[in-house]
Amino acid sequence: MSKKKEKKAPVVLEQIAILDFAAEAKCIAKVNDEVIFVQGAVAPGDIADLRIIKSKKSFKQAQAINIQPLSKHRTEVACSHFGICGGCKWQHVSYESQTAFKAQQVKDNLTRIAKVKLPEFQPILGSEETYYYRNKLEFTFSCARWLTEDEIGKEDLGNMNALGFHVPGRFDKILPVDHCYLQPDPSNVIRNGVRDFAIANGISYYELKNQQEGALRNLIIRNTVTDEWMVTVQFAYATEEEIKLVMEYLKSSFPMITSLNYVVNQKGNDTFHDLEVVCYYGKPFMVETMEDLKFQIGPKSFFQTNAKQALKLYQLVREYADLQGNEVVYDLYTGTGTIGLFLAKHATKVVGLEYVEMAVEDAKINAELNGITNATFFAGDMKKVLTEEFIAIHGAPDVIITDPPRAGMDLDVVNQILAVKPKKIVYVSCNPATQARDLALLDVAYEVDVVHPVDMFPQTHHVENIVRLRVKN
């Protein structure tokens, strides 16, 4: 009979100084010249014990415990769920320090990875609103809530239902959220109202593990800067009576809801792009306003989740594109066409390309809504659509706007840009590391003359960055 291996006690390094911020909301410490990437609510200047969770040849990863909060970068935490939720990992860091590190992160990536000649960077554009800035949140129902350390091992755990966010790393455990600081009210009031109503009326919560039972599955709350509110409820195994009960409650209790919808989803995941959405009350969409443009947003539409800061981002893109009115502009990875439509009145023609077909349909609707006739949008794999034949039909671009996903641009797309050689490229990125990689590839023909970081997501480590490139003389 083989013996079970005894589980080794974790290695804990005591009283270690936290030296600096690192990527992905981590910090850096050093012990005997070995780098340790530290996760947890620490900041440079703190002292903490470090529980080693992973060891590599060149570095270690650790969880900070027994933290002595000494850092000058610290500030008071607003949210009672901080440290468990994982959604706002930098709440304990002052906003001034957050933006300073984000700007430094952009500089480090572009310097170390791109290794191209760089201009003096523009100061990072911070967000006026550092809380309650999001216009969309998704909450999950679960009949098996996350247990606190005090509750583990107890027999009487009370109500196990939860409506809130997934605990990081756990698909099956939901943290009940009482008050979230990301979206303005009545978001919290609506969520807590649905929670209490369902419990009072015996309406079951979804079983995330077996996915075979439970009426309520997901709650999506969206809003616009003009105070339109959209609520979409995902039901799983609900009766018609239960659906009507919940929807009537929302309709009668929250008159500010302008678009009330539901979807029945019994799939293995929460996505509902391929499912019918039923508009129960109001309009089947909201309308967001940016300057003189209007954007129609449906339950399935993508839209920037910080609309006020997105407007400033788009204004900077327009400024750096510096259009004179006679240019052909290609908007790559256009999404719902927001940037392209922003530029259309300043260009002869805008051509938008995007791989998500549904987003392109939204872009076409928004072009029509705004009476824009010189912008056309196409769906498909970017490297397959952006061909010599396509360019011959639609005209060679004078300016290219590109806003790719975190993975950056495909090599084939970079090569096609180099082949067609527009005069200017304005590159918007949510990942300065892959942006830097692409800048190195473009360096054979282009020089960078503007770098401008923008903070879209306060209390997180994420940062956007705008780079303008011009053809080398």
Image (spheres, rainbow, N blue to C red):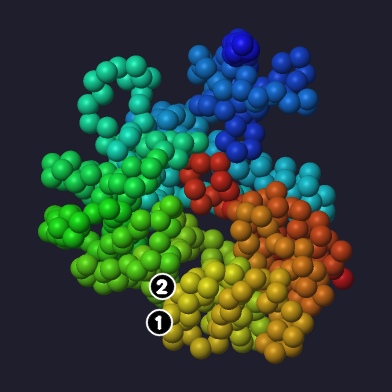
Tell me where residue 377 sits by quadrant: bottom right
Q: Secondary structure at mark 1?
A: helix
Chain-order first, disc 1 or disc 2: 2
Tell me: residue 193, above or below residue 344.
Answer: above
Q: Are marks 1 and 2 in contact (CB under 8 Å)?
A: yes
Q: Residues within 10 Å of mark 2 (few under 14, many from 20)?
A: many
User: Looking at this rendering, what residue extends furthest in the front direction?
Assistant: 1
Tell me: residue 162, above or below residue 42.
Answer: below
Q: Secondary structure at mark 2?
A: strand
Residue identified by numbered label 1: 369
In this rendering, would 137 be left or right of 409? Answer: left
Number of numbered discs: 2
Tell me: residue 46, above or below residue 117.
Answer: above
In this rendering, would 232 be left or right of 49? Answer: left
Say which amino acid is labelled 2: Phe
Rendered-image quadrant of the N terminus: top right
| Image spot of residue 295 (x, y percent) | 41, 72
| Image spot of residue 102 (x, y percent) | 60, 43
Q: Residue at x 27, y 44 (%)?
A: 205
- Is residue 282 visible in the rendered structure shown here? yes
Q: Nearer the viewer, residue 365 or 163?
A: 163
Residue identified by numbered label 2: 295
Q: Residue at x 68, y 77 (%)?
A: 385
Q: Nearer the viewer, residue 396 or 143?
A: 143
| Image spot of residue 302 (x, y percent) | 46, 64
Q: Residue at x 30, y 71 (%)?
A: 284
Rendered-image quadrant of the C terminus: bottom right
Q: Residue at x 70, y 62 (%)?
A: 409
How far separated are the C-alphas under marks 1 and 2?
8 Å
Say which amino acid is labelled 1: Leu
Tell me where residue 166 sits by quadrant: top left
